[in-house]
């Protein structure tokens, strides 16, 4: 079945350093969504990308959707302790009613 | 955020108990979902309801029984659970469940379930 893979699984960074997580789908996606889950919290929708090659920014966060619409990345510039959490990417199932989530990247920020 | 609420927030139950989890969404969505989140495992989709009809059952054991009486409410009835069922159970809603994940999902805070 359709798979969505994320790397890395974990990342520890020093506060102020940049961070990037990558997402790869086994199939072409109609859209890619990103969610953040703080420790002890629940996933919160961040953004959706739809167009091939699309780039969107939210303050220090930059999201990209690959040209082939099979991969995506989330880049955080100058991380802060508030960025701590797990970042999930997710894409719609090609045929069905599911949103297929990646396993997530856990970000820890050392101050 | 109070768009999707879940009760109880924490639940401890024995393997012979019967309990129910409740989810309510105040966003006017017509699709609702149950997910299971275990430690060190990806989010596992359990059930999808679109317009109050179950459209997805992701090979979930029969000891989990969902109910969707209307588009705002979703229940998960639990009976004779196993210790490995201990996890965070998350409810989510979205604008439209029929188009398969094309709309973002809004999650509730979850119920932390411990089966003893």
Image: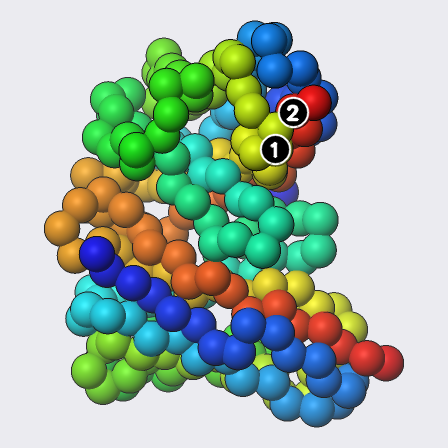
Horizontal side of A53 relative to A75 (left or right) equals: left
The residue at 67%/17% (across/down) is B13
Which of the two labelled residues, at mark 2 and mark 1, occupies the earlier sequence position? Answer: 1
In the rendered image, which quarter is residue B110 located in?
top right
At which x and y percent is residue B23? Answer: 51, 24
Q: Is residue A58 visible?
A: yes
Q: Are marks 2 and 1 in contact (CB under 8 Å)?
A: yes
Helix or strand or loop: what does disc 1 sit on? loop
Q: Is residue B2 above or below residue B100?
A: above
Horizontal side of A30 relative to B67 (left or right) equals: left
The residue at 22%/86% (across/down) is A67
In the rendered image, which quarter is residue A36 located in?
bottom right
Q: CA distance from mark 2 to mark 1?
A: 5 Å
Residue at numbered disc 1: B86
Residue at numbered disc 2: B115
Counting every numbered tag in the picture gives: 2
Helix or strand or loop: what does disc 2 sit on? strand
Who is closer to the viewer here, A58 or A73?
A: A73
Q: Which chain letter goes with mark 1?
A: B
Q: Quadrant of the C terminus of chain A?
A: bottom right
At which x and y percent is residue B115? Answer: 65, 24
Circle 1: is it few (<14), some (14-19), or many (20+) Cα within 10 Å?
A: many
Who is closer to the viewer here, A25 or B86?
A: B86
Q: Which chain letter goes with mark 2?
A: B
At which x and y percent is residue A90? Answer: 37, 61
Respond whether the residues carrying marks 2 and 1 are from the same subunit.
yes
At which x and y percent is residue B64? Answer: 43, 21
Q: Is residue A62 above or below residue A36?
A: below
Horizontal side of B50 relative to A80 (left or right) equals: left
Who is closer to the viewer here, A7 or A58?
A: A7
Who is closer to the viewer here, A106 or A35?
A: A106
């Amino acid at each position: 079945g359709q798979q969505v893979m994320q790397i890395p699984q974990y990342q520890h960074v020093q506060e102020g350093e940049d961070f990037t997580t990558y997402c790869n789908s086994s199939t072409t996606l109609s859209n890619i969504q990103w969610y953040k889950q703080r420790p002890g919290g629940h996933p919160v929708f961040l953004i959706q990308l739809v167009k091939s090659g699309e780039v969107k920014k939210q303050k220090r966060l930059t999201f990209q959707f690959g040209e082939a619409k099979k991969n995506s990345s989330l880049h955080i510039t100058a991380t802060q302790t508030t960025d701590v959490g797990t970042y999930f990417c997710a894409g719609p199932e090609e045929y069905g009613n599911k949103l297929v989530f990646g396993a997530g990247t856990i970000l820890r920020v050392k101050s | 955020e109070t768009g999707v609420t879940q009760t109880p927030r924490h639940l401890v139950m024995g393997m012979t108990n019967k309990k129910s989890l409740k989810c309510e969404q105040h966003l006017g969505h017509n699709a609702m979902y149950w997910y299971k989140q275990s430690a060190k495992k990806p989010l596992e989709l359990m059930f999808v309801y679109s317009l109050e009809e179950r459209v997805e059952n992701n090979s979930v054991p029969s000891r989990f029984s969902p109910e969707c009486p209307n588009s705002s409410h979703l229940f998960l009835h639990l009976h004779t659970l196993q210790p490995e069922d201990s996890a965070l159970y998350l409810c989510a809603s979205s604008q439209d469940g029929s188009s398969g994940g094309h709309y973002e999902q809004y999650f509730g805070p979850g119920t932390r379930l411990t089966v003893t």
